[in-house]
Image (spheres, grey):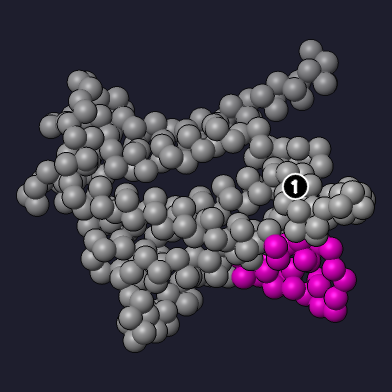
């Protein structure tokens, strides 16, 4: 076997090991969600008898359905606001030359990776004082604080790749600056917008720290935080399998989004706005 062939085989083996390592915990959660009765503690990977009982328990729980509605609503609102504002901010950053431009992008990146646990407790006290505690708005505001810099940073890279001569040509043909932006620039930046929107949605959808810190009831509590309070069919039974079923349910939207927008995500992350 040639050295090139051996290298290819090792790359394939490594890829398979990584995929198995990543998928085994997911498969275990899915398997556990279909177990019922003594199957849960029999230490076997797959259930001896497949059951949808845990999924019925989850959907009959007001705690879960209310939390799911909160997560969907808060995530969609925060993502929409973040991406719309980020488009204008990224456009300005890419088109204009002003002092501190690189510092601004560096700060945006720094805020994105800032540990949110550091501000959870101060926000808890502040939100209780101003009346935003345990409300949708009380979660949307901090989500915007972290998702907006991320969206600006991602979108500014796409806007920099756009040939501005196309915008100037549209204006020469009679389009206003807003029409040129909406009809020429936005379509070219569509892959970047999809990428920023999906990354933002994932970050908000998976948040646990703000969800558990800034809520105290079902009024605004999102799914990741609500799972910590999920008691299953009754308070006398271990909710392990129902929690696994709930985890599978909340993962489905993420999987669906990735499958629907897979090509745009890949194009956005690899080729940039012009080629997408």
- Locate residue 136, reporting x and y percent: 37, 65
- Locate residue 102, reporting x and y percent: 81, 71
Instruction: Give the residues drawn in magenta, as a range.
Output: 88-112
**Relative vertical location of residue 164 with respect to residue 115 in this rendering, above or below:** above
Instruction: Tell which of 122 and 190 is nearer to you.
Output: 190
Q: How many labels does the image show?
A: 1
Callout 1 crowding tier (Cα within 10 Å): few <14, some 14–19, many ≥20: few
Image-quadrant location for residue 13: top right
**Relative vertical location of residue 147 with respect to residue 23 in this rendering, above or below:** below
User: Is 230 inside the magenta-drawn segment?
Assistant: no
**Relative vertical location of residue 182 with respect to residue 144 in this rendering, above or below:** above
Quadrant of the snapshot with the C terminus: top right
- Locate residue 114, reporting x and y percent: 58, 70
SS type, badge 1: helix
For mark 1, what is the residue?
Answer: 183
Q: Residue at x 62, y 70 (%)?
A: 111
* Left or right, 205 with reference to 194: left
Instruction: Tell which of 158 and 169 is nearer to you.
Output: 169
Q: Which residue is drawn at 58% across and 27% down?
A: 16
* Left or right, 3 with reference to 110: right
**Relative vertical location of residue 4 with respect to residue 193 in this rendering, above or below:** above
* Left or right, 159 with reference to 140: right
């Amino acid at each position: 076997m040639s050295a090139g062939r051996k290298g290819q085989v090792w790359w394939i083996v490594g890829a398979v090991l990584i995929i198995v390592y990543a998928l085994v915990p997911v498969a275990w959660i899915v398997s556990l969600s279909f177990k019922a009765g003594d199957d849960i503690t029999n230490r076997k990977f797959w259930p001896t008898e497949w059951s949808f009982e845990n999924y019925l328990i989850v959907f009959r729980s007001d705690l879960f359905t209310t939390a799911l509605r909160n997560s969907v609503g808060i995530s969609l609102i925060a993502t929409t606001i973040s991406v719309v504002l980020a488009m204008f901010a990224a456009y300005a950053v890419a088109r204009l030359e002003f002092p501190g431009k690189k510092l601004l992008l560096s700060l945006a990146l720094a805020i994105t990776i800032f540990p949110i646990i550091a501000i959870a407790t101060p926000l808890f006290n502040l939100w209780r004082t101003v009346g935003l505690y345990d409300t949708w708005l009380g979660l949307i505001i901090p989500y915007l604080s972290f998702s907006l810099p991320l969206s600006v940073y991602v979108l500014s890279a796409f806007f920099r790749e756009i040939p501005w001569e196309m915008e100037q040509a549209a204006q020469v043909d009679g389009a206003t600056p807003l029409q040129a932006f909406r009809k020429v620039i936005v379509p070219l930046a569509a892959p970047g917008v999809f990428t920023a929107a999906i990354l933002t949605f994932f970050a908000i959808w998976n948040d646990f720290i703000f969800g558990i810190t800034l809520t105290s009831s079902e009024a605004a509590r999102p799914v990741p935080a609500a799972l910590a309070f999920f008691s299953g069919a009754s308070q006398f039974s271990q909710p392990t399998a129902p929690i696994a079923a709930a985890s599978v349910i909340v993962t489905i939207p993420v999987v669906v989004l990735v499958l629907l927008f897979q090509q745009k995500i890949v194009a956005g992350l690899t080729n940039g706005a012009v080629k997408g």
